């Protein structure tokens, strides 16, 4: 069972401190963020590919890479075709 993520800032959000810019970008641009059962975050937005990332990134580049994936996905358009799905960059 996946559960929605509530983004908060302040003194007690130490575990999300590195993820805060990513979560703020996602919620500011219409992405839904939920926890998965495996301990990851799932970012979803209508007509965009699903993005997964770790809830506790061990590498300092992980947040920057996930942010780049979200920004790149915002420039994509997913089109349903009779024989499959096509993803176009806008």
Image (spheres, rainbow, N blue to C red):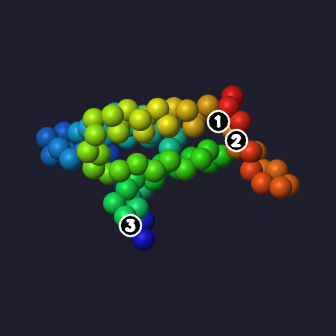
* Other residues around mark 2 within 10 Å, as few (<14) / some (14–19) / many (≥20): some
Residue at image position (14%, 41%) is: 11
Label 3 vs 1, first from the N-terminus: 3
Image quadrant assignment for residue 5: bottom left
- Image-quadrant location for residue 65: top left
Q: Is mark 1 on a helix, strand or loop?
A: strand
> CA–CA distance between discs 2 and 3?
28 Å
Q: Nearer the viewer, residue 76 or 62?
A: 62
Viewport quadrant of the N terminus: bottom left
Whether residue 24 is visible? no
In-front residue for pair 21/53: 53
Q: Which x, y percent locates residue 82?
A: 85, 55
Q: What element carries label 2?
A: strand
Q: Which residue is drawn at 17% across and 44% down?
A: 14
The location of residue 42, given as percent across then percent down, is 45, 53
- The residue at the far bottom in this view is 1
On the rendered image, what quadrant is the C terminus found in? top right
- Identified at 61% across, 31% down, the residue is 75
Q: Does residue 43 lie above or below 64 as drawn? A: below
Percent of width and height locating residue 24: 38, 36
Which numbered disc covers residue 37?
3
Q: Earlier in the sequence, mark 2 or mark 3?
A: 3
Residue 37 placement: quadrant: bottom left
Residue designated by label 2 = 87
Q: Mark 3 and mark 2 in contact (Cβ < 8 Å)?
A: no
State how far apart marks 3 and 1 are (Cα): 27 Å
**63 with respect to 74 (left or right):** left
Is 13 positioned to the left or the right of 86 in the image?
Answer: left
Q: Name the residue under label 1.
A: 76
Disc 1 + disc 2, Cβ < 8 Å: yes
Report the Cα–Cα distance between label 1 and label 2.
6 Å
Q: Residue at x 50, y 47 (%)?
A: 51
């Amino acid at each position: 069972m996946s559960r929605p993520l509530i983004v908060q800032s302040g003194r007690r959000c130490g575990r999300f401190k590195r993820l805060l810019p990513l979560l703020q970008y996602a919620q500011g641009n219409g992405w839904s963020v939920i926890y998965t059962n495996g301990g990851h975050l799932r970012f979803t937005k209508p007509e965009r590919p699903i993005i997964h990332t770790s809830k506790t990134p061990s590498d300092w580049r992980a947040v920057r890479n996930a942010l780049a994936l979200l920004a790149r996905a915002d420039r994509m358009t997913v089109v349903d075709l009779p024989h499959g799905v096509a993803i176009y960059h806008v």
